[in-house]
């Protein structure tokens, strides 16, 4: 009988506190289930053998580590709500004669029951829904469906190991919290208010400065490369600033409302304001957590949805034509010898052997170089480009007047070092331009970039220049100097549309690629050459796999974070409801009605709970330029499309947020109205 006393006491405590334990257990189950699903998908045999599998596997691997890290933070956070609510009960046990060691036994059994339920139900649901998740991922990534059901043993053992350790740490934390408290403190824990944090004005100013700095950085970034490097720093700065502002802001708001007699001394405002003042720091930290989770959901779902629904546009931005082979020649002299006619003849023979005529044929020569801009000077030294501000990096394209006329049908008259200019993603208002030892005089402009190959989709700001002849670039023609060759690339581009199904297009492209290889294998005068090749039919699987898996992961993580935000709001409402119950009880005895209670709750909603949503929207607005720059690196170029997806994501999330609060507010009302 004595053996079962503590387990029974633990079960009774969990049953009596089911309003607290049920959401906590559901949180644990959800985390176990989500981790198992992502981990099991990473072992999927279907994904391993599919096109684009490497990209999908990398994305899923990232997702499961995010879930694992977030599980630790979130479960410790929610466990703190649970333990705080049980303090009074544990204090009563102490007064009735149970020492801390015996209370510890109750805590151990409660922790074991939660762990067993969470692991058993979480794994069961994870196994049950893993196939549905796999089918969803296969559909999003445009991979052929396979209905065979598999259960990877490794995914089960890893899940049990990870969450077994987490639940063990949670149990240790609960035992430590009980051991460090004395019985009287436990009994008074619910009635212990919080002192306003000292120096809250300074905290608020620091938070405001950090947030403004992060916002200014986000909107001032010009280069996608710079956006990628500062993104995580900006995220950390926004998280820190949000916590500082909410903690100090809750204090300042309460003081301001209390000073307003016309507002404070009304029955619908008095209780809500005094309740907020009673738990200032905790109130601010909880709202900040909700705001950060909301921002994470908005950024993830808007960016991943933009990539997924804009994937066909991204493919066409990267590959303007169905197939393309760009050959990088070793010297400037190769632009003028017989190698280009020989390559052209090999391509045409390959097409004839396949009975195929290319459509929308695009053939050209051009040279390009990456350099760091400083006024009218461009430094092409590779060692310096990596050390300067990415906002100053430019790509320079050079096309001869003869090739420009062949491409556009427009004749230009240029002499010596004269040049025409066109800019993409940047401005250039000078009349001279110097790159390395080459000095050019800008005598005219072009309406568009004459180069219509993969370089057109390059996300670095580009200056396209028409020069009189490629001999102008002779200072870069030094093949014996490895740095000189690495700096300037002389390229022959051959691109076309097929109008054929993917499999036939891939076969023709493969034959063309073999023809190009044969030309260079049969020539002994080429010490080095390079090649860029791309085929929409081949790349589509990688694009769909990458963007589909990112969208799938974005949905999974968004569901997790929305659920986490809902749990934080719920626990905030429940814990504050029990703390406010006595105050509302007193107010009811002196005349406050049920309708007055609802008005007071609505006052608190409008005053506090929609602040995280509004600030999350502000975070999203200022983060948008940074996110947009990063999306451009994925060849997404339609700004208004991304804006539309982002606005839709915010409106959809706002509707979810309002629904979550409405449901949790009911639980708060039931408690305080008792």
Image (cartoon, helix red, strand yellow):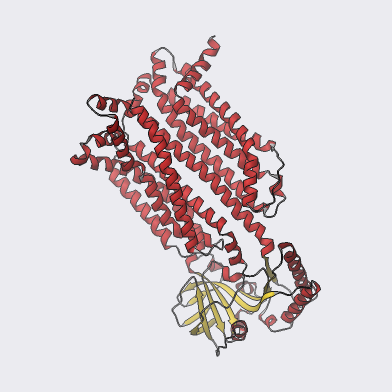
Q: Residue at x 65, y 45 (%)?
A: 135
Q: How many marks?
A: 0
Q: Is residue 160 visible?
A: no
Q: Is residue 30 visible?
A: yes
Percent coordinates x, y for residue 125 in the rendering: 60, 34
Q: Is residue 329 above or below residue 131?
A: below
Of residues 572 and 255, the one drawn nearer to the viewer in this rendering = 572
Of residues 603 and 385, the one drawn nearer to the viewer in this rendering = 603
In the picture, the quarter occupied by the N terminus is top right
Percent coordinates x, y for residue 6 in the rendering: 51, 15
Q: Quadrant of residue 497?
A: bottom right
Q: Quadrant of residue 178?
A: top left
Q: Is residue 120 above or below residue 255?
A: above
Percent coordinates x, y for residue 400 in the rendering: 60, 84
Give the residue furthest to the front: 595
Percent coordinates x, y for residue 249 in the rendering: 31, 44
Q: Residue at x 32, y 29 (%)?
A: 580
Q: Residue at x 49, y 28 (%)?
A: 22
Give the residue furthest to the top: 1
């Amino acid at each position: 009988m004595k053996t079962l006393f503590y387990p029974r006491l633990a079960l009774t405590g969990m049953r009596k506190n089911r309003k607290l334990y049920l959401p906590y257990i559901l949180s644990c189950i959800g985390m176990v289930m989500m981790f198992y699903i992502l981990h099991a998908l990473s072992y999927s045999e279907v994904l391993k053998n599919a096109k684009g599998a490497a990209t999908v596997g990398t994305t899923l691997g990232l997702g499961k580590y995010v879930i694992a890290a977030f599980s630790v933070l979130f479960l410790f956070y929610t466990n703190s709500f649970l333990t705080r609510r049980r303090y009074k009960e544990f204090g009563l046990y102490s007064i009735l004669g149970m020492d801390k060691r015996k209370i510890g036994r109750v805590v151990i059994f409660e922790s074991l029951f939660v762990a067993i339920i969470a692991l058993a139900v979480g794994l069961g649901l994870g196994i049950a829904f893993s196939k549905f998740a796999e089918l969803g991922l296969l559909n999003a990534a445009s991979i052929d469906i396979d209905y065979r059901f598999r259960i990877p043993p490794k995914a089960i053992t890893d899940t049990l190991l990870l969450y077994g350790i987490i639940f063990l740490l949670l149990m240790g934390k609960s035992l430590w919290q009980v051991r460090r408290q004395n019985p009287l403190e436990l009994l008074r824990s619910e009635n212990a208010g919080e002192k306003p944090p000292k120096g809250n004005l300074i905290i608020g100013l620091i938070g405001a400065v950090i947030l403004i700095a992060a916002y200014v950085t986000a909107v001032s970034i010009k280069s996608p490369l710079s956006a990628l490097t500062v993104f995580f720093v900006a995220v950390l700065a926004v998280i820190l600033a949000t916590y500082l502002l909410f903690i100090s802001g809750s204090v300042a708001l309460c003081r301001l409302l209390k000073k307003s007699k016309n507002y404070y001394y009304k029955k619908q405002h008095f209780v809500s304001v005094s309740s907020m003042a009673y738990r200032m720091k905790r109130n601010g930290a909880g709202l900040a957590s909700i705001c950060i989770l909301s921002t994470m959901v908005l950024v993830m779902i808007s960016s991943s949805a933009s990539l997924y629904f804009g994937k066909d546009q991204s493919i066409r931005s990267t590959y303007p034509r169905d197939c393309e082979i760009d050959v990088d020649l070793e010297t400037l002299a190769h632009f003028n010898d017989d190698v280009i006619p020989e390559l052209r003849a090999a391509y045409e023979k390959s097409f004839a052997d396949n009975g195929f005529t290319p459509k929308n044929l695009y053939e050209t020569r051009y040279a390009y170089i990456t350099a760091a801009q400083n006024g009218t000077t461009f430094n092409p030294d590779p060692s310096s480009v990596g050390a300067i501000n990415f906002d100053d990096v430019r790509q320079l394209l050079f096309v001869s007047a003869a090739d420009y006329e062949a491409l556009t049908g427009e004749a230009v008259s240029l002499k010596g070092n004269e040049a025409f200019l066109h800019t993409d993603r940047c401005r250039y208002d000078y009349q001279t331009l110097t790159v390395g030892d080459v000095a050019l005089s800008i005598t005219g402009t072009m309406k568009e970039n004459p180069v219509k190959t993969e370089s057109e989709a390059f996300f670095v700001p580009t200056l396209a220049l028409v020069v009189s002849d490629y001999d102008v670039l002779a200072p870069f023609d030094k093949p014996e100097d490895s740095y000189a060759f690495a700096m300037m690339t002389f390229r022959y581009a051959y691109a076309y549309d097929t109008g054929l199904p993917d499999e036939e297009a891939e076969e023709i492209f493969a034959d063309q690629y073999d023809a190009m290889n044969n030309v260079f294998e049969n020539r002994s005068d080429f010490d080095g050459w390079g090649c860029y090749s791309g085929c929409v039919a081949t790349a589509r699987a990688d694009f769909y796999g990458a963007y589909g898996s990112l969208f799938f992961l974005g949905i999974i993580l968004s569901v997790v974070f929305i659920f986490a935000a809902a749990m934080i709001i719920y626990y905030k409402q429940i814990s504050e409801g029990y703390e406010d119950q006595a105050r509302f009880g007193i107010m009811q005895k002196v005349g406050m009605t049920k309708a007055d209670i609802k008005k007071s709750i609505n006052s608190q909603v409008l005053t506090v709970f929609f602040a995280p949503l509004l600030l999350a929207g502000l975070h999203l607005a200022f983060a948008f330029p940074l996110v947009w720059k990063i999306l451009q690196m994925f060849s997404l170029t339609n700004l208004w499309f991304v804006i539309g997806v982002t606005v839709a994501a915010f409106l959809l999330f706002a509707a979810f947020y309002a629904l979550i609060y409405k449901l949790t507010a009911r639980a708060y009302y039931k408690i305080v109205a008792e």
